[in-house]
Amino acid sequence: KNKTPPRRGSRWMTTRAPRRIDGIIYTHWDRTLRPVFDAWRGECVGKKKEKRAEQRAANFLRRLMNRELAQAWSQWIDMTHSVNRLRNIMCRWLQREIAKAFETWCRMNEAASGHERTIQTVKKFVAKLANMGLSRGFEAWKELTEIRQAARQKMKRAANRLVNAGVARCFDQWTEVTSAIKGKKQQMMRFLRKYFHKGLTKAWTTWAAQCE
């Protein structure tokens, strides 16, 4: 014969058993899950702080890179002005020397007209002065060109070092944060499954005992 449970047991099942189950779940939550949740929330706050730090580092790298580029640009402008100034000086000097040579030739031509040897001497003198001025100008231009190329190479190497260092630093920080968050998530999921099943088992055992 099927025995009907007493009214007292049915009342306990409908009123007190749910409260007791809620109390057990809340107790396990307060003892075990709350620390995990607090740790997870702390990691989220730490992640925001790390993002802010990464942004500050990126801004600092940009400012530093812009400063290096500005210095290199200023050096290049200064060298360009120096080249133009030297070119003007060489042109004025060459014109002055040619004018002096021409005046000398005119005086010599007036004093000894008809002498081919004198004319050839003046021509050689003028050619020598012109070649000397051009060779000096070419050497100065070559030296400034080499200085400019060295400054460009230095600027490129500095920019590459800054960019590579910033990228490597950001990648290392991102890898560390990702691995830490992944490990904490797996630990929290195992913890939740363990204590959630334990709480349900206790509640089921209590309910079965009350039914008997």
Image (cartoon, rainbow, N blue to C red):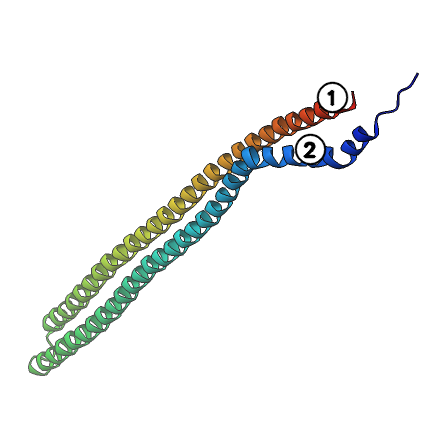
Residue 9, located in which quarter of the rendered image? top right
Residue furthest bottom as drawn? 110
Tell me the residue at 28%/57% (across/down).
148
Residue 88 place in picture, x, y as percent: 23, 73
Residue 170 place in picture, x, y as percent: 44, 44
Q: Amino acid at mark 1?
A: Ala
Count up the numbered dots.
2
Horizontal side of 20 relative to 167 (left or right) equals: right
Mark pair 2, 1: CA separation: 14 Å
Horizontal side of 179 relative to 28 (left or right) equals: left
Horizontal side of 109 relative to 13 (left or right) equals: left
- Disc 1: which residue: 209
Residue 67, located in which quarter of the rendered image? bottom left
Residue 14 place in picture, x, y as percent: 78, 35
Residue 109, located in which quarter of the rendered image? bottom left
Pointer 1 local density, CA inside 10 Å: few below 14, some 14–19, many at least 20 = few
Q: Amino acid at mark 2?
A: Ile
Q: What quarter of the picture does the C terminus occupy?
A: top right
Q: Nearer the viewer, residue 54 or 157?
A: 54
Tell me the SS state at disc 2: helix
Q: Which disc, if any, is residue 40?
A: none
- Disc 2: which residue: 21
Residue 176 place in picture, x, y as percent: 46, 37
Q: Earlier in the sequence, mark 2 or mark 1?
A: 2
Tell me the residue at 78%/23% (across/down).
211
